[in-house]
Amino acid sequence: QVQLVESGGGLVQAGGSLRLSCAASGGTFSNYAMGWFRQAPGKERDSVAAISWTGSIRYYADSVKGRFTISRDNAKNTVYLQMNSLKAEDTGVYYCAAAGLWTTRLDEYNYWGQGTQVTVSS
């Protein structure tokens, strides 16, 4: 069983930056593809970014390409999401998740963190 704990959320002005972290425990971190998802108020949870086991493959939603960067440190069992040039529409709860296969589909992620709130003021 993998446990995931996100941190780094908060309130930031539009144009600012935040770095989210997700610490994993209870499993072999390097065996899992990792993803970041976000859920805006009143909307479904959507994929934001994903990274493969070694970091050689990365996926970004069109809405965040060029602004967000996903990375991982397998020695620290941690995945990161660097978010730059934040916009009001980036507001939401950000979740990290782990999957035993390469996927960007929400329903194929097996383990989820509790989420961290990101609020971007315009």
Image (cartoon, grey):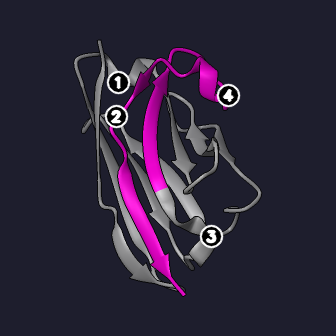
Whole-percent x and y of residue 53? 50, 27
Q: Which mark is residue 74?
A: 2
In the image, residue 101 lies at what x, y percent?
Answer: 59, 16
Q: Amino acid at mark 4?
A: Arg
Q: Nearer the viewer, residue 44 or 62?
A: 44
Magenta stretch in the rendered image? 93-122
Above or below residue 100? Residue 46 is below
Which part of the image, by quadrant, shows the C terminus? bottom right
- Residue at 47%, 17% (x, y): give it: 110
For the residues carrying marks 2 and 1, which lies nearer the camera in this image? 1
Label whose residue precedes the other's in the sequence (3 or 1): 1
User: What residue appears at the point 40 percent right and 70 percent down from the top-left corner?
Assistant: 18
C-alpha span from label 4 to label 1: 19 Å
* In this rendering, the label closer to the viewer, 3 or 4: 3
**Residue to which mark 4 is pinned:** 105
Mark toward the start of the polypeptide (2 vs 4): 2
Residue identified by numbered label 1 = 29
Asked which quadrant contains residue 11, the reply is bottom left
Of tags 2 and 4, the one toward the viewer is 4
Query: Nearer the observer, disc 3 or disc 1?
Result: 3
- Label 3's element? helix
Left or right? Give the position of 112 relative to 15.
left
The disc labelled 1 sits on which kind of residue?
A: Phe
Cβ atoms at labels 3 and 1 below 8 Å apart? no
Query: Which element type, helix, strand or loop, lies under badge 2?
Result: loop
Question: In which quadrant of the rendered view does residue 113 lie?
Answer: top left
Tell me which numbered mark, 2 or 1, is placed earlier along the sequence: 1
Chain-order first, disc 3 or disc 4 = 3
